[in-house]
Image (cartoon, rainbow, N blue to C red):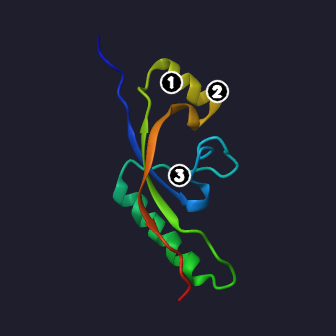
Amino acid sequence: METAPTLIFYAYTGKSEIGEDRWTDRTLPDYFYEDKDAARRDMLGLHAQLEADHANSYPPLCLERIETVPMTRSAIMALLNDGVGAIIGSYQVIEEIDVKHR
């Protein structure tokens, strides 16, 4: 019997968003990337914008590697009904950069 595949995606977020509720609060949508370099490039673009904003302070930005649960029919139904958190098998921060004003 063939096993359903797990998938690897990448995303980035502020360090303050990392934690137990990372995938349950869906007030701000995440953008997911198939390619780590594309995710990192967009994260660095946001980083440059935040560093230029001298009026506010921001938490460090974190690049994440996300692995889904096996993508079965049930997993896809959970994704549709319960949101992205239902298919997150594991995730880890693979890079963190501070936002410092220049």
Q: Say few, some or many: other residues with alpha carbon within 10 Å of mark 1 (under 14 / 14 to 19 / 20 or more).
A: some
Left/right placement of residue 16 relative to residue 71 reads right
Q: Position of residue 10 (x, y in %)?
A: 42, 50
User: Measuring 57% from the left and 37% from the top, which residue is drawn there?
Assistant: 84
Q: Position of residue 23 (x, y in %)?
A: 59, 43
Instruction: Kindly identify which residue carries mark 1.
Output: 75
Q: Residue furthest top?
A: 1
User: Which quadrant holds residue 51?
Assistant: bottom right
What SS does tag 3 mark?
loop
Q: Number of callouts in the render?
A: 3
Q: Is residue 32 above or below residue 2?
A: below
What SS does tag 2 mark?
helix
- Separation (CA) of disc 2 from disc 3: 19 Å
Q: Residue furthest bottom?
A: 102
User: Measuring 68% from the left and 79% from the top, which residue is drawn there?
Assistant: 56
User: Which quadrant holds residue 90?
Assistant: top left
Q: Say few, some or many: other residues with alpha carbon within 10 Å of mark 2 (under 14 / 14 to 19 / 20 or more).
A: few
Q: Position of residue 21 (x, y in %)?
A: 63, 44
User: Measuring 53% from the left and 70% from the top, which residue is drawn there?
Assistant: 46
Q: Is residue 25 above or below residue 96?
A: above
Instruction: Kindly identify which residue carries mark 3.
Output: 31
